[in-house]
Amino acid sequence: MDSSRTGQNAGPEANPADPADAVAALADDIGQSLAVARVLARQGRELALTGLDQRIGMLCAQTLDLGPGPARALRPRLAALLAGLDALHDLLDGAP
């Protein structure tokens, strides 16, 4: 799969001045990439997930750089991202 179709090379649409907004935008962008990957996986199409680990690593590092309050506020968004990643894993692993 072409990485441009999953947004893997695309950063957040905007570069917000607030670091918490930037982290939220990155999480949303990764979430959208995972959603597209799940659709393509269900269709049996080939996926190219190159760089996903680096983007998630960047998300983790940027989240750790936030103060406890802003980072805590992102917890539901990050939990949803983890659920999306787990769902993709299950699809690729052949789980029902």
Image (tube, helix red, strand yellow):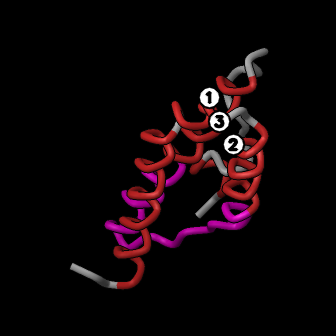
Is label 1 in a helix, a strand or a loop?
helix
Q: Depth check: give the residue in front, 48 or 64.
A: 64
Q: Are marks 1 and 2 in contact (CB under 8 Å)?
A: no
Q: Residue furthest top?
A: 17
Q: Earlier in the sequence, mark 2 or mark 3?
A: 2
Give the residue type at disc 1: Pro
Residue at 60% over, 32% down: 24
The residue where tag 1 is placed is: 70
Q: Is residue 52 left or right of residue 34?
A: right
Give the residue type at disc 3: Pro
The residue where tag 3 is placed is: 68
Which mark lies nearer to you, 2 or 3?
3
Q: In which quadrant is the N terminus drawn? A: bottom right
Q: Residue furthest left?
A: 96
19 up-or-down from 76: above or below: above
Q: Are marks 3 and 1 in contact (CB under 8 Å)?
A: yes
Is label 2 in a helix, a strand or a loop?
helix
Q: Where's residue 83, x and y in %?
A: 39, 58
47 up-or-down from 59: above or below: below
Q: In which quadrant is the C terminus drawn? A: bottom left
Q: Are marks 2 and 3 in contact (CB under 8 Å)?
A: no
Give the residue type at disc 2: Thr
60 up-or-down from 92: above or below: above
Which mark lies nearer to you, 3 or 1?
3
The residue where tag 2 is placed is: 63
Residue at 49% over, 54% down: 34
Residue at 33% over, 66% down: 43
Q: Is residue 42 left or right of residue 78?
A: left
> What span is colored magenta in the figure?
33-53
* Crowd tier of the residue under label 3, counting other residues whose Cα lies within 10 Å: few below 14, some 14–19, many 20 or above: few
Q: Where's residue 86, x and y in %?
A: 41, 67
Residue at 40% over, 60% down: 38
